[in-house]
Image (cartoon, grey):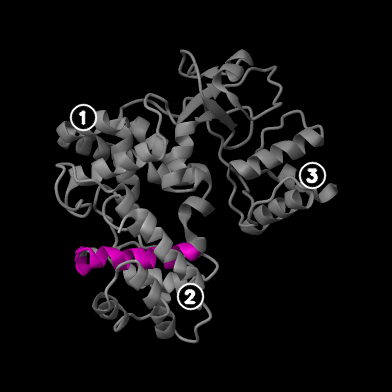
Amino acid sequence: MNRRELLAAIALVAAAPAFARDFSSFVESFREAARVAGVSAATFDSVASSLTLDPTLTGKRAAQGEFVQPLKSYVDAAASPARAAKGRAMAQRYAGPLREISARYGAPGAMIVALWGMESDYGAARGDRDILRSLATLAFLHPDNPVYSQEFVAGLVLLQRGIPREKLRGSWAGAMGDPQFMPSAYMKYARNFGGGGAPDIWTSAPDSLASIANFLKQSGWTPGLPPLIEVKIPKNFAYSSLRGDFGAFAVAGVAPLAGGALPRSGEAMLFFPVGGPSPAFLLSGNFFVLKAYNFSDSYAFAASVLTERIAGRPVFRAPWPKETNPLTFTERQAIQRGLAARGLYDGKIDGRFGPVTRLAIHDLQKKAGVAKADGFPSRAVLELLEKN
């Protein structure tokens, strides 16, 4: 069964009765979707007969650090000098395979290693939960999110295809192996470095590195384009738009803080992590490729910083003021609600600030005549919404 057929099969999951009165009945409701996906009754029963709900997963979705910590705090921990030093050692250890993988897939070795470090600390923190139990539990607890149900069926397919149950272990969210792939991501992106057999993302570093690199390539990675560039904003900058091509930003006087020129082509977004005018970064298309790995801006930012540190290049040339009295989760939601009420935002009210929310804030600031329309979710923005 190819991937398209599999996706069609697990689409049946949408019909599963999420309102089942007990967990065992809920698991049983996946039997038909699993059968259509190619899972035998014997394989399904081997899982369903002993699967129990994991009560420790209640509330896990809201607690992810990359979505709730201040950006600088998250980056300091996720892209720490110690993790960068370990990454350099790993890059040296696997220098041969990395050169071949980088040439084959177009992503730089330092970035591939950085994602390995971000995901599992280079294999030291893969997680040891039964991912089938985790995914079934999360599907039961969060019927609003069909991804967990679909991944549960995909995990059953992996078991049917011969991946041992003891290998289907990983994080609380169902991600497994060194790259922390969900079951469907394993089927789509995992690659065997040597070209034969099922990819081993649990014990083979070259397979894991090749799989991460293939993910980047298949997600649209542009070779030679840095995900983010620290820039200097000229004093007369108009803040008229936070999006544009690199050429337009260059004409407006935005320049790399490290010297040199901006890329000649490609779209970019201007990002002020603590408000304008400094520090400031241009986020390229490759930054948003990293968000395909993990949707958090903080994650993509930290992965980019870790890449620079593994490569031995300096980061954060401009001073980074400490964010004092940051917005609470409730206040962040209030900003999104206020933006939505004004027709500027149509995303989820989840307190997570990404490009969509920041661009909506920028629109609000421009409409209100704010000179420095930096898109930064500050208390001044909250007050602006409360006044109008």
Mark 2: which secondary structure? loop
Instruction: Give the percent coordinates (x, y) of residue 5.
Output: 37, 58
Is residue 244 something one can see in this rendering?
Answer: yes
Q: Residues within 10 Å of mark 2 (few under 14, many from 20)?
A: some
Q: Is residue 362 magenta?
A: no
Q: Residue at label 1? A: 99
Q: Position of residue 58 (x, y in %)?
A: 47, 72
Foreground pick, 148 / 204: 148
Q: Position of residue 109 (x, y in %)?
A: 27, 32
Residue at 44% over, 70% down = 138
| Towards the viewer: 197 or 61 | 197
Q: Residue at x 33, y 35 (%)?
A: 111
Which residues lie in the magenta part? 146-166
According to the picture, the residue beneath numbered tag 2 turns out to be: 16
Seen in the picture, residue 260 relative to 25 is either above or below; the reply is above
The quadrant of the rendering that contains the N terminus is bottom left
